[in-house]
Amino acid sequence: MTMPPFPEPTVPADGRAEVFLRYLDYFRDSVVEKVAGLAEEERRNSRLPSGWTPLELLKHLRHVELRWIEWGFEGRDVADPWGDQRDGRWYVAPEESFAELTATLRAQGAHTRAVVEGTDLAARGAPGPRWEGADPASLERVLFHLVQEYARHLGHLDIVAELAGGPVGE
């Protein structure tokens, strides 16, 4: 299995928005590839004291983008922005498949790309419950948050995949 190429800083980009999108695409694809490289049993079981599974992480990252882009920045009415959680922890139902979770993550990524490509990075998000009473953040700040969220969780997944005998390295 070949991981996507890292978006090297020396590769020219049309602007900051394109840089954010390259990193988000890289991290999203890397998460999917790491989870794809695991046996189904390893995808659904945890090797960590915290108890999260690779499939739960995949679902969580989709909801992170949903919460920050659609519910937060766009101010959309999202039926269940915390749909990745149950009883205070991440949750994947037994009938949810890797293919389904991957498809929803990729669709969320396509939505994020469309928003970023059609919006100035300095634009402020719509007021709403995501901001918990604070002034909405700019799109640039939201994207910076998403990049760090993906990078951090991909690092967690790197360790889990290595423990499970799955793909290692960047």
Image: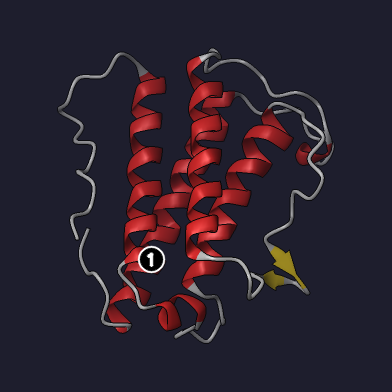
Q: Residues within 10 Å of mark 1 (few under 14, many from 20)?
A: many
Count of numbered circles in the view: 1
- Vertical arrangement, residue 43 with respect to residue 20, above or below: below
Q: Residue at x 22, y 69 (%)?
A: 168
Query: Of helix, strand and loop, which one carries label 1?
Result: helix
- The colour scheme used to paint the residues is secondary structure
User: How far across and how far down the image is residue 77, in percent?
Assistant: 82, 34
| Residue at 61%, 15% in the rendered image | 123
Residue 154 located left or right of residue 141: left
Which image quarter is the C terminus in?
Answer: bottom left
Question: Residue at coordinates 22% horizontally, 53% vertically from top-left?
Answer: 3
x%, y% of residue 62? 57, 50
Q: Quadrant of residue 1?
A: bottom left
| 34 displayed left or right of 4 | right
41 or 113, nearer to the observer: 41
Q: Residue at x 33, y 33 (%)?
A: 22
Residue 51 x %, y %: 56, 82
Can you tell which quarter of the image residue 5 is in? top left
Give the percent coordinates (x, y) of residue 85.
71, 65
Q: Quadrant of residue 94?
A: bottom right
The residue that mark 1 highlights is 35
The three-letter amino acid code for the residue at tag 1 is Val
Q: Is residue 119 above or below residue 20?
A: above
Q: Residue furthest left?
A: 10
Residue 60 left/right relative to 87: left
